[in-house]
Image (cartoon, rainbow, N blue to C red):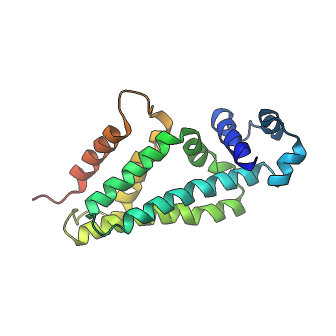
Amino acid sequence: MKGKMLDTCISLFGRKGFRETSIQDIVEANGITKGSFYYYFKNKEDVLVYIHDSFISDLLNKQKRIIEAEEMSYKEKLHAMVEMMVKNIAGGADSAMVFFREIRNLSEAKTKEILPKRDLFQKNIQNVIEGGVSHGEFRSDLRADMLSYAVLGVANWSYFWYEPDGQVDEQQLTNIYMTMILQGIEEES
């Protein structure tokens, strides 16, 4: 029941927004009572925290596997990370929308719980770029921290406009992004 309720919340928050979705909307969409809702969650913010934590934890786990792939070059790792972000958005547009758009509705205390994981995700991208610089795969005259934010901005903003069933599939979009990114940061031969 908790999983079904979370899926419903993600859909409602994605479609209507967090503030505009009431607990009554959630229970009606699930055909349950408010008591059932409160059995699983303390309040609506508790649901939002769970959604955020699940989303970023899943991304961090996928990112960790990419980072630990010793057979991959830094270019390949960066490509795999961008591809992972695009696929994640394509496979769960509502989850991505809730994650990126609704963090502003978390209390300061709850935001402090989520931000370290978001920061770690960015820092891991920065570390891959720095590794690529130190191994001569990327230019050394650009700041890795700023590049990591640029990569995140390019990939993450896709949740807003990307249509997975449209003319450009996930792999094509990843290749477009990577061509743009690498032609800007790749060391010239």
Furthest residue in direction bottom, as rendered: 134
The structure residue drawn at horizontal position 50% and vertical position 62%, both measured from the top left corner, is 61
- Residue most extreme to the left: 189
- Tell how many labels: 0
Q: In this view, does 107 lie to the left or right of 28?
A: left
Furthest residue in direction front, as rendered: 1
Give the residue displayed 82% in from the left and 33% down from the top.
Answer: 28
Q: Where is residue 107 in the image (x, y as percent from the top left)?
A: 72, 56
**Which residue is pictured at 42% across the width and 52% down the height?**
152
Observer able to see residue 150: no
Horizontal relation, residue 24 to residue 55: left or right: right
Q: Position of residue 120 (x, y in %)?
A: 49, 66
Determine if residue 179 is in view: yes
Q: Is residue 177 left or right of residue 99?
A: left
**Image spot of residue 101 (x, y percent):** 59, 44
Asked which quadrant contains residue 109, the reply is bottom right
Foreground of the two, 184 or 13? 13
Find residue 161 and report its horizontal and vertical position in percent: 46, 33
Residue 134: quarter of image: bottom left
**Could you say which is closer to the camera, residue 150 or residue 132?**
132
Compared to residue 20, the image places residue 60 above or below, namely below
Would residue 101 appear left or right of 77 to someone viewing this image? right
- Relative to 57, residue 31 above or below: above
Q: Residue at x 48, y 43 (%)?
A: 89
Q: Which quadrant of the figure contains the C terminus?
A: bottom left
